[in-house]
Amino acid sequence: MDLRQLEYTVAVAEELSFTRAAARCHIVQSGLSYQIARLERELGTPLFERTSRSVRLTPAGELLLPHARRVLGDLESATAEISALTGLVQGNLRLGVIPVNHGSVDLPAVLQRYHRRYPAVDVIVSDTGSVAMVTMLLAGTLDAAFLGLFADQLPAGLAHRVVTIEPLVAIVDEASPCAGRTSADLRELAATSSFIDCHHDSGLRTQVDLAFARARVTRHVSFELGNLLDVARMAALGLGVAIVPASVAHAIPDPGGRFSVVRLTDPLALQPVNLVFRDPAPGSPAARAFIDLFAETDLAAFRQVIGANPDPAGESSGSDRGASRYPGRAGGSTLET
């Protein structure tokens, strides 16, 4: 068994395709298949079930996969740690981000700042949704992630730093009874319209579901989408009501007054964005450098990089409101678990 074989095994397991795995590892497919077949002969058992249409792990493959990832990760960390002794931070930063959220993270601006300081680090970005990225953080396949979950919605083994908290608002069509009003409750909204939601694996969906649970209201969801801006745009076109962060609602142009942005009466209807990572800290120097870059920047300056969060009522910012409702959840310079 050698490191190349472990690398190829992980690639096939993640890609579920020998062709894509070979391209990812920069090797011809026959060479990759040969190395995995050698490993299987050495172990005395197949690692993959292969058909003409699919590839999937056998029980033996499932057992080997986390060990292979750990070995490769430890080698990568060791190499990066040795380089860090000379003052050079290099390696990979595996970063998770929430799909498009104008009030949360301007990812290109954040990464520009990071890359200028650590040009030898390669950044790999995932945007699979908050719930899935929690699992990836715990498994070590992500180093850090911007998630739409509060601290008490995170499992043990993860720490976080607050980026922002902002109010959730409703986007309603001009024909809605709630159009033009300053606020509405979820019961009234659910009685007059169907809803457009993000997928269940999103942090926003978690917060919206909790708001309806607090109101003891069941809503009808007509559309589920993966992109938050698409959710808002479809609501603006009159296809249903969308509950979104205030900054997202105000990012949608409305030249003809076709929709209204209505504040919710539930003061706990809030959307957080937290930078989440393993506790006590990621092992990768590249990941630690990213966390440290965040920690050394005061929150006001950081928000100049990632953008402001408009409040639909013209009152205090979403994070200030969140701090008063959720003691200990706001205050981005404080490490919390």
Image (tube, helix red, strand yellow):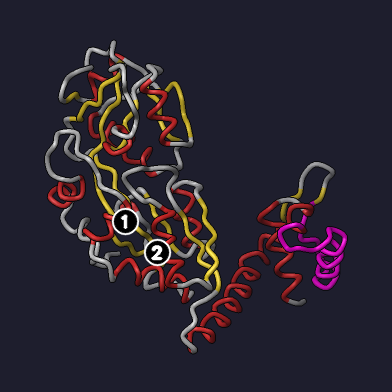
- Extreme bottom residue here? 86
- State the residue at coordinates (17%, 20%): 181
Name the one closer to the observer, 288 or 212. Answer: 288
The answer to which quarter of the image holds residue 100 is top left
Name the one closer to the observer, 225 or 337. Answer: 225
Amino acid type, mark 1: Val
Q: Residue 146: x, y in percent?
A: 39, 54
Query: Which residues are the magenta region?
Result: 23-49
| Rendered position, 195 above or below 41 | above
Secondary structure mostly seen in magenta is: helix
- State the residue at coordinates (26%, 51%): 164
Q: Is residue 335 left or right of residue 25?
A: left
**Quadrant holding the N terminus:** bottom right
- State the residue at coordinates (39%, 59%): 110
Going from the N terminus, do you reach mark 2 or mark 1 first?
A: 2
Tell me, for residue 113, which label it has, or none. Answer: 2
Q: Is residue 43 magenta?
A: yes
Name the one closer to the observer, 195 or 79. Answer: 79
Disc 2 from disc 1: Cα separation: 9 Å
The answer to which quarter of the image holds residue 336 is bottom left
Where disc 1 sits, the SS reads helix
Q: Which residue is mark 1?
A: 305
Amino acid type, mark 2: Arg
**Quadrant holding the C terminus:** bottom left
Q: Residue 77: x, y in percent?
A: 54, 78
Instruction: Tally the numbered discs.
Output: 2
Tell me, for residue 211, which label it has, or none. Answer: none
Where disc 2 sits, the SS reads helix
Q: Is residue 159 magenta?
A: no
